[in-house]
Image (spheres, coloured by chain):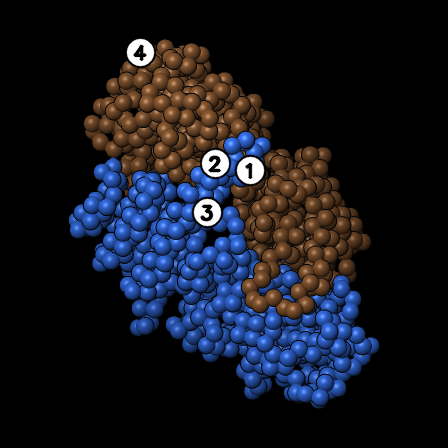
Chain colours: A blue, B brown
């Protein structure tokens, strides 16, 4: 491709000035919705709106053309009908646009005529030194610039996962879902039809990007698989690449061809490429988020020896099964660890690994048990169940039936209990973060889902440094993934 | 066992009068927490509290003994220390108690002395014609009586899943989590040490119970596996039995031995038993809830032919892969269905199965597409993605950054859009329920998680008749499970 790939992607994710070409006063149009989304999240650059018919959005007037703005615009976002896109390219060029996001659909994804139009658009753009994202994309985000240039009303949480998705609906919904769960994103791009800039370009940029610590790809088909493999081999020791490859079955590959015109390729070829490139394969959409988030927040273990710490016995049994099936070694407690734990726990504790803390309500003792296990040289990783988010578990009751007369006193009781649990559970969470940093061992935590996501924003909780899984299956898979990542890194001498 | 098994279980789940032996004014004691939980949820029978030292809870006075109440008490719940439990058995007998739940721990699960004490307790109880639940249990619930006799502050949603769990912490947390998700329970029992009443007794009762439409078991080890198999063979054509068998690995079986003194048994033996008994195996804790809820709310399909309807293309690709891998047949659209869909959707729709509705915002058109697919004789089951809970997807944005100045107008815009989506999404959900009832075909829906669980209570939404899965993996597994259930029933001539 052109030599200005990285310059264009740089401008895409760090635009000092951007413009929406096709701004609209009609509430139902993308040309209205997108600028509103950008304004909502407080974009740190300058936003300009272009529509020759005039108008304004939230007090920002429409300019008749890009050139009429009279300033150099780095990024243009184009929301006008497909047929009209090519015409605005010279105007973009005149305003200094380096890269244009073509939101409009109706190109190669929809008809042979659309394909011809798309090819013509690319030629025109390249003649004018402009690179293209899309067409048929839902947009991009960039946390560094508080930029949410998206069609759907998703507000991404800032963080360190960079995400390129070959699907707008899946990509933006994962972005929303991840943010809701406490996962932060550095950059997001919905790649659309990849008529020009493609997966390889974004991957190359993410590798260099200081804001990005893990890379997430939702892929139906690569345009340049060899370049991707070359890049992945270069990048993947320094930054983990999590990939979800869709279209691996016959029904899925037919669907991918219709959706993104992607040649899904043989499953075996992609498997080989993923392995050789040191990429990490997510088997489910949930794992896409679980894995990329874990790789940002947790250290990689030095081996497979895993200790399980559980508030109660049932979850301990389930977690032991799952960890063993995932290939982790649930090795016995060494005598010194056994002795220390016995001095903390009641006489009827499990006396083995998994460590069942037999339901004790003293959450400070949970923290001491965690410290003992984490400090032991016998273990490379810890899976902790139940203590984290304990307040969530204790906040689950709902007013499903009529309120009893004595509601008030009962509410007070509950509040006292809950406050205690919440304080101690939070203290435990901070200790998880500290121990991970001190000891370089992952502590994978399982907690009940928060009843109220407001807690993510308002309460004193180290969300930016901790991953919480709502069931032990997910925790076991994450722990096993981290172990494999460690083995890969050591095999590459890192 | 004794002939009064069913009489005892009947009294356990339908007590007109119950008493807490060991009621306490100390807020930290189970003898205080449990009665508060019972009062909170408005138990429809009469609750009595017993403690010779006197006191009261929420205005209910403590009686010095069960006999002193002067009425026949069917169910006693005992929260006093293990050593003292046996002593109160004669008092229980005098008051007419049929069944006693022994909350107290410190029996066979904790020491050889505890085991001796437990055996002695059982003998004493049987001498007095009393049957026992536990010891070492977190209690029971019964929706018919609005009875929540539990240690943790979980408020179960009423419904039609009966759940017996060989773990208090896992069982009650699943109960809370399920209720939070919209799953309703008819009965719940934490079986504890199974010193007397055991899995077989509860299973037999659930089979007869009119409130119960699906049975869920969390099992570490059965005491009477042959009886379970016999019962399962009798029951499982009429009522589905979902089972999660824990302790299948060496680490897990060691943990189970320590936790519930269960002999986890060989994985192969349990597998054979599950298959022969026509039970449905949940592979994950999440599937325990997904499967039992689906079996209550959805009809069983007549075959494997599955249509996929998706709001967007990415999820369509993913769902097609998953359904095919799960063994479903994602068969092509017949010409008449193709034609009808083409008349509803824009020209650039997917023109195949999966049906990609290419992101159209007209949710009434989604409903029409669903009607066309469901009515077609070419399909036995439908998987629908994105339309359900669309308001959730559109409500995901959070005030993560500073509020923009123009907050108000933007909030209004969002509200208008959201209200439209919410209304139409709800209409779609009601149509899902109607179509399932009319056509007897399952419609498995995938939607973004609700941002706000209040919606479960307050909004006009058919929660009692619809299951919503937050990712297509879960939906594909549920659809495949329903297909297998159908095949099982047909193989048994049902």
* Closer to viewer: mark 2 or mark 3: 2
Q: Which mark is residue A399?
A: 1
Residue bearing the label numbered 3: A392
Mark nearest the camera among 2 and 4 is 2
- Number of numbered discs visible in the structure rendering: 4
Q: Position of residue B73 (x, y in %)?
A: 43, 15
- Would residue B364 appear left or right of A395 to someone viewing this image? right
Question: In this rendering, do the residues under marks 3 and 1 share a single chain?
Answer: yes
Residue in the foreground of this view, choosing between A194 and B419: B419
CB within 8 Å, label 4 to label 1:
no
- Foreground mark, 3 or 4? 3
Q: Dot 1, how many residues are within 10 Å of its Cα: few (below 14), some (14-19), or many (20+)?
A: few
Element type at mark 3: helix
Instruction: Tell me how far mark 2 sits from mark 3, CA to CA.
Output: 18 Å
Q: Residue at x 33, y 11 (%)?
A: B128
**Secondary structure under badge 4?**
helix
Q: CA distance from mark 2 to mark 4?
A: 39 Å
Rendered position, A54 above or below B376? below
Earlier in the chain: of badge 2 and badge 3, it is 3
Q: Are marks 3 and 1 in contact (CB under 8 Å)?
A: no
Label 4 crowding class (10 Å Cα cut-off): few <14, some 14-19, many 20+? few
Residue at mark 3 to residue at mark 4: CA–CA distance: 44 Å
- Reading the image, the residue beneath label 4 is B127
Q: Secondary structure at mark 2?
A: helix
Residue B145: x and y in percent read: 53, 24
Residue that numbered label 2 is attached to: A410
Q: Nearer the viewer, residue B151 or B329?
A: B151
Q: Secondary structure at mark 1?
A: loop
Same-chain status of marks 2 and 1: yes
- Badges 3 and 4, same chain: no
User: Disc 2 versus disc 1: distance between alpha carbons?
Assistant: 13 Å
């Amino acid at each position: 491709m052109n030599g200005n790939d990285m310059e264009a992607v740089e401008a895409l994710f760090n635009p000092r000035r951007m413009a929406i070409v096709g701004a609209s006063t009609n509430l139902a149009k993308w040309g209205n919705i997108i600028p509103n989304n950008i304004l909502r999240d407080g974009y740190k650059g300058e936003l300009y709106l272009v529509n020759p018919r005039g108008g304004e959005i939230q007090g920002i007037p429409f300019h008749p053309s890009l050139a009429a703005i009279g300033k150099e615009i780095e990024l243009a976002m184009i929301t006008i009908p497909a047929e009209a896109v090519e015409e605005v390219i010279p105007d973009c060029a005149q305003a200094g646009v380096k890269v244009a996001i073509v939101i409009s659909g109706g190109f190669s994804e929809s008809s042979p005529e659309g394909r011809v139009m798309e090819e013509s658009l690319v030629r025109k753009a390249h003649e004018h030194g402009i690179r293209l994202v899309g067409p048929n994309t839902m947009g991009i985000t960039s946390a560094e610039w508080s930029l949410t240039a998206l069609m759907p009303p998703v507000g991404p949480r800032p963080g360190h996962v960079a995400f390129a998705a070959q699907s707008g609906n899946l990509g933006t919904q994962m972005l929303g879902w991840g943010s809701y769960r406490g996962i932060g994103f550095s950059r997001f791009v919905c790649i659309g039809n990849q008529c020009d800039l493609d997966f390889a370009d974004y991957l190359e940029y993410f590798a260099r990007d200081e804001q990005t610590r893990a890379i997430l790809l939702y892929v139906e088909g690569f345009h340049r698989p060899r370049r991707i493999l070359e890049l992945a081999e270069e990048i993947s020791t320094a930054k983990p690449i999590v990939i979800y490859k869709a279209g691996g079955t016959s029904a899925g590959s037919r669907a991918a061809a219709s959706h993104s015109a992607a040649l899904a390729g043989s499953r075996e070829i992609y498997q080989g490429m993923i392995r050789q490139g040191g990429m990490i394969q997510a088997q489910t959409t949930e794992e896409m988020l679980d894995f990329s988030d874990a790789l940002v927040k947790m250290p990689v273990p030095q081996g497979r020896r895993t200790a399980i710490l559980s508030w109660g016995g049932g979850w301990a049994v389930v977690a032991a099964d799952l960890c063993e099936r995932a290939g982790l070694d649930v090795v016995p407690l060494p005598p010194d660890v056994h002795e220390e734990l016995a001095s903390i726990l009641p006489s009827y504790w499990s006396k083995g690994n998994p460590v069942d803390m037999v339901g004790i309500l003293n959450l400070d003792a949970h923290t001491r048990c965690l410290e003992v296990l984490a400090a032991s040289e016998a273990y490379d990783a810890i899976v902790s169940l139940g203590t984290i988010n304990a307040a969530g578990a204790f906040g689950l009751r709902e007013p499903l039936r009529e309120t009893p007369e004595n509601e008030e006193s009962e509410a007070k009781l509950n509040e006292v209990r809950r406050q205690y649990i919440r304080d101690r559970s939070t203290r435990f969470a901070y200790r998880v973060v500290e121990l991970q940093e001190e000891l370089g061992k992952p502590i994978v935590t399982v907690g009940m889902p928060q009843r109220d996501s407001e807690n993510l924003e308002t309460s004193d909780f180290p969300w930016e440094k901790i991953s919480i899984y709502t069931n032990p299956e997910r925790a076991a898979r994450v722990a096993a993934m981290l172990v494999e990542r460690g083995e890969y890194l050591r095999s590459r001498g890192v």
